[in-house]
Image (cartoon, rainbow, N blue to C red):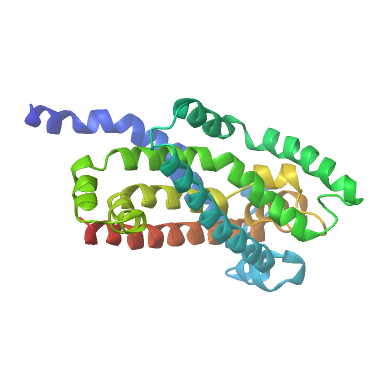
Amino acid sequence: MHKNLHKYFPIFVLPTLIAFSIAFLVPFLMGLALSFCDFTIVSDATFVGFNNYVRAFTDPSSNFLYSLGFTACFTMISIITINVIAFSLALLLTKGLKGTNVFRSIFFTPNLIGGIVLGYVWQTIIDAVLSHYEVTLLFNPKFGFWGLVLVMNWQLIGYMMIIYIAGIQNIPGDIREAAAIDGANGFQTLFRITIPMIMSSITICVFLTLTNSFKLFDLNLALTGGGPANKTEMLALNIYRTFYNRNGWSGAGQAKAVVFFLLVGVIALAQLKITRSREVENQ
């Protein structure tokens, strides 16, 4: 059986490998090459070295560094709030309360709604509330920032909650019973048994929250559009506008996209390494 699988392995892998190459690998390599070129269309690309990267980071009109800082702050707050609330709900909904399945479904439903639709709906809701104070979501960048955090939490908490519930339910009951017999209180059980035992779930949830927050585009476009004055413009939206909305900036936009890819990759891999090391320690 294993010999046959080894023999025909290339045949089964080939379709996926071809699709991966066409949809990702080839475009990525072309984009990497174009980040070192000045171009309007691919066929008229002219090599300019690192000029696009220098321009992306140093030109005041680029707004790239500001968008990077804004995105980093948004991501840090989203990771903390989403995971703390999701984990708290998961603990509550694994206590055998009446109507638990109904509450799980209710909390998970927002994850099924698309980002563009979600952004416009919440923009209407938030502006309706703020209208009582004679301001709008775009009146102050702080309103836009916390509006993005609010909607991101509303959308992802239910999904992360389900992952945490699965992790909590996989904790052997005899471990908790032994802790109770030894006199462990609720906080000791939480921090010395529950959290260490679900580190794999924490790894997954932090990774998903981090990557989804850092590369957020549709919700940013629909909810604030980067306003006011590009003060709530996140990295993905900044790259999109640089590439498509500014003449002569296609190369710089491509350079930003390459930097963005590397940032997300490095940060995500670092997070996985840190949290997985905790999993090893707690096995």
Residue 96 position by quadrant: top left
Seen in the picture, residue 226 relative to 49 is either above or below; the reply is above
- From the viewer's perspective, is 200 left or right of 280? right
Q: Which residue is outermost to the right?
A: 134
Q: Residue at x 88, y 52 (%)?
A: 135
Residue in the foreground of this view, choosing between 100 and 71? 100
Q: Residue at x 33, y 42 (%)?
A: 168
Residue 21 position by quadrant: top left
At which x and y percent is residue 49? 58, 69
Work out which quarter of the rendered image holds the C terminus and state it. Answer: bottom left
Q: Can residue 240 be seen from the camera position used here? A: no
Q: Can residue 4 be seen from the camera position used here? A: yes
At which x and y percent is residue 13? 28, 33
- From the viewer's perspective, is 178 left or right of 241? left
At which x and y percent is residue 178? 18, 49
Total numbered labels placed on residues in the image: 0
- From the viewer's perspective, is 223 left or right of 172? right
At which x and y percent is residue 60? 75, 71
Q: Residue at x 65, y 48 (%)?
A: 150
Work out which quarter of the rendered image holds the N terminus and state it. Answer: top left
Q: Residue at x 43, y 37 (%)?
A: 93
- From the viewer's perspective, is 246 left or right of 116? right
